[in-house]
Image (cartoon, rainbow, N blue to C red):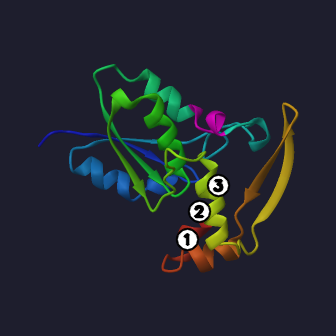
Amino acid sequence: MAVGHFVLIHTICYGAWIWHKLKPVLEAAGQRVTALDLAASGNDPRQIEEIGSFDVYSEPLLAFMESLPQEEKVMLVGESYGGLNIAIAADKYREKIAAAVFHNSLMPDTNHSPSYVVDKLMEVFPDWRDTKYFTFTNNGEEITGLKLGFTLMRENFYTICPPKVYRMS
């Protein structure tokens, strides 16, 4: 069986740890797997206030793609908001992409800005419950950040997971 190289990208407010169940399964099947922490996520030491754009947030993925040998092709897997990150990478490094998998994910189109899908999501899912929003300034630009609420995660995202799983987030 041919070995593929999967690059797993998490959603906002999470880290590479969300792939803790899938990664070993793929590896046991003989696949190469790289799960990345995006900027200010997981083990990345930066703070959210240091991130001024979605390109900066995507920098660990973009740097990884840049580091790949020219002949290597990977399968990008983006979960939820991670679809926006893999779309950016696919646009910049299309020659290094074997496939892009948008798993339960936001998938931008070619007719609108990437934030269009976020705006549409907010129309159909406006109640973010106990999520905390905050603003900060980066290079003179006001940016909105968020911290997902425990109730939102328990009642909307982790409805059938044991408590230890949603506590990890």
> Callout 2: helix, strand or loop?
helix
Residue beneath the point at 29% across and 55% down = 25
Q: Which mark is residue 13?
A: 3
* Quadrant of the snapshot with the N terminus: top left
Sort mark 3 into few (<14), some (14-19) or many (20+) by Cα contacts within 10 Å: some
Distance of mark 1 from mark 3, alpha carbons? 17 Å
Task: Indicate which disc, 1 or 3, sits on the residue closer to the N terminus.
Answer: 3
Q: Which residues are magenta?
A: 54-59
Disc 1 marks which amino acid? Lys
Side of 61 relative to 101 (left or right): right
2 vs 3, front mark: 3
Disc 2 marks which amino acid? Met
Residue beneath the point at 30% across and 31% down = 73
Q: Which residue is mark 2?
A: 168
Q: Is residue 3 above or below residue 66?
A: below
Sort mark 2 into few (<14), some (14-19) or many (20+) by Cα contacts within 10 Å: few
Sort mark 1 into few (<14), some (14-19) or many (20+) by Cα contacts within 10 Å: few
Side of 30 relative to 12 (left or right): left
Residue beneath the point at 45% across and 62% down = 104
Nearest to the observer: residue 44 or residue 105 = 105
Residue 36 visible within the image: no
Count of numbered tags:
3
Q: Which residue is mark 1?
A: 164
